[in-house]
Amino acid sequence: MEETYLQSVRYDGETLYILDQTKLPQLTEFLELTDIEEVWDAIKQLKVRGAPAIGIAAAYGLVLGIKEAPEKDFESFYEFFKKQSDYLAASRPTAVNLFWALKRMDTRAKQESSKPVTEIKMLLAEEAHLIRQEDENVCSSIGENALTLFKDGMTVLTHCNAGGIATARYGTALAPFYLAKERGMDIKVYADETRPLLQGARLTAWELMQAGIDVTLITDSMAAMVMQKGMVQAVIVGCDRVAANGDVANKIGTYGVALLAKAHNIPFYVAAPLSTIDLETETGEGIPIEERAAEEITAGFGKSTAPEGVKVFNPAFDVTPHHLITAIITEKGIMHGNYIEELPRLFEN
Amino acid sequence: MEETYLQSVRYDGETLYILDQTKLPQLTEFLELTDIEEVWDAIKQLKVRGAPAIGIAAAYGLVLGIKEAPEKDFESFYEFFKKQSDYLAASRPTAVNLFWALKRMDTRAKQESSKPVTEIKMLLAEEAHLIRQEDENVCSSIGENALTLFKDGMTVLTHCNAGGIATARYGTALAPFYLAKERGMDIKVYADETRPLLQGARLTAWELMQAGIDVTLITDSMAAMVMQKGMVQAVIVGCDRVAANGDVANKIGTYGVALLAKAHNIPFYVAAPLSTIDLETETGEGIPIEERAAEEITAGFGKSTAPEGVKVFNPAFDVTPHHLITAIITEKGIMHGNYIEELPRLFEN
């Protein structure tokens, strides 16, 4: 059952194959995991990264973890199940999708409690597949919607990695590029390297190359010149959180790219699954911005590149105000700027 | 004769002390050079960098090189002198200031040809000192002029390294910070790290820290957020070339910073010695932009950080159009936006 595309998390009923993202871009290595402890390690050590991919890995990890669960009655099965689920939850306590996926597996287990345990085990494997499939569908729909905004022959800039390897397939911001490729459309990509952690260089450039998509790597400081020279006609990025007014928190540097796009009259698009839209947060000012360790900047390449003891400011995200965002692309359609009215409608029936 | 500031090129009559910039920021090491071959090596191996600093090092290198020159008549002296000068000129054939400094030494030698050779040797050492002193004066004047634009308590962003170690002293864009420090003014600096070669992290942050100036290092992608949060009130950068209309070529990323400054209503200043103003070039479009090796982006720090064989676009400079430049600061005064009329006046008597 070999897939023709590169799948970062795949389960064949016995083995969980996980792309080891810590080895990228030098090595394309898949871990072959057959017990829950190995999945715990893979999540803990960031070998699998990206919120959706972590959730999917956790669901499959739990499927592996309950193989040996007692089958005589639901109570003894569920006790075992819960222990395994709590164990996995502790692998990366800040990963929201990890808990979300485990919670969903828990709900399904309880729903099916009247069935024989052997069947429940099969249904939980099915639930993990569903989680994976739904994520693929979300990404695919975002890609479809985004693609209506792009034309054959266009070149598009992206920042950071909102890609296929962080999700079940396709990614969010990168989804239209995969779909365009499947349809023989010619869409080229410029990838910002995305300092400090270089997700653009290490991951975006890598996964697009794997798929045979034409990608050119630049430093973040080159985006302005690329726009000035007319080398890109649109920008698309992913996001970590969208506030109710359409302000978007995303990887540091996104706000700058949005300003540069505005200055060059280039549309700036944000790909946002509904799971990232947070109507409880009124504006971007309500989104907390994590500051990270100085070493990411001073010694990010395995070698000290800044003076010992230098003061550093290292915010992980920035907030792009809604007025710079041409459209927010979700799996349920495209929002065109009147976000405060458009976003709540996405959650109506 | 120990100086209280850090001088990247210093000659005490016997030894030429050169700050080994290839060791920065990890090690502050001065080479102690006593013959012309050692100076040739230091220039060749980029241990001394920055156009003015290279010129100064070459002039002193020539002084070392003619110590053993025959003294019986000018002709035999000059033959020796010319051989040494040609030797030094070959150390870095693309460095304009190298030829400029050697040419100036040559002119002085010929001017003094009627004097005894022992005296000519002293006068050539004086000429090298003059070259150094004039560069210091230019930088100091630029700093004085720039400082009239800054206020006590301000924080200023800079990009790349137009600093003291690239010149005799003070640098160009960094000159106002040194002068402010000397006068007890409180001016803080944010330094963009300046990918791909990290001159901001390795050199600017380092030399400002050495001088006790408050500097904070950020990645290039953080400049927009720093402006958004009101953390800087002005930007100052150096330049490689100014066209007749005021368009400025400078390190890649400068144009983006200028656009970001404009979007935040922050003044954007360029420090430009007259030697960088090229009235023969009408606009920025006439300035050729060097593209450099992909490895600077894909493996800049001793470790591959991008996929093997990835396409890369790596321009070394960009052009900031004159309308984004609030003022161009020269040693002869500040130009305020009507560059096409103001710049030629700098070259009138």
Image (spheres, coloured by chain):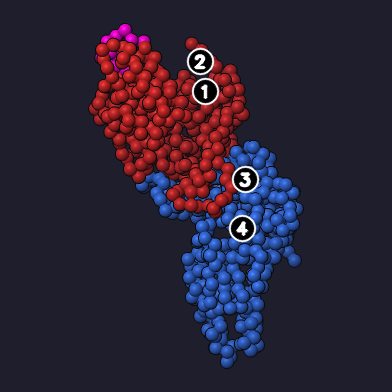
Chain colours: A red, B blue
Amino acid under disc 1? Ile
| Residue at image location 74% in from the left, 49% down from the top | B152
**Image quadrant of residue B172?**
bottom right
Q: Point out the image quarter for the N terminus of chain A.
A: top left
Q: Amino acid at mark 4?
A: Gln
Image point 49% across, 41% down: which residue? A194
Q: Which residues are magenta?
A: A111-124
Mark 1 and mark 4 residues within 8 Å of each other at the beta carbon: no
The numbered mark at residue B210 is 4
Query: Which percent across, then down, holds residue B125?
Result: 62, 78
- Where's residue B78, x and y in %? 56, 84
Q: Nearer the viewer, mark 2 or mark 3?
A: 2
Looking at the image, the residue that sits furthest to the bottom is: B72
Q: CA distance from mark 3 to mark 1?
A: 33 Å
Residue bearing the label numbered 2: A347
The chain carrying label 1 is A
Let me know if residue A74 appears in the view: yes
Whether residue A37 sits left or right of residue B32 in the image: it is left
Element class at badge 4: helix
Q: Which residue is mark 3?
A: B258
Disc 2 and disc 3: Cα gap in Å?
A: 41 Å
Separation of disc 4 and disc 2 at Cα? Answer: 56 Å
B33 in relation to B190, above or below: below
| Amino acid on which the number 3 mark rests in the picture | Ala
Q: Do residues under tags 2 and 1 come within 8 Å of each other at their CB atoms?
A: yes
Q: Secondary structure at mark 3?
A: helix
Q: Chain of mark 3?
A: B
Q: Position of residue A144 (x, y in %)?
A: 42, 24
Answer yes or no: are tags 4 and 3 on the same subunit: yes
Q: What numbered label is drawn on residue A235?
A: none
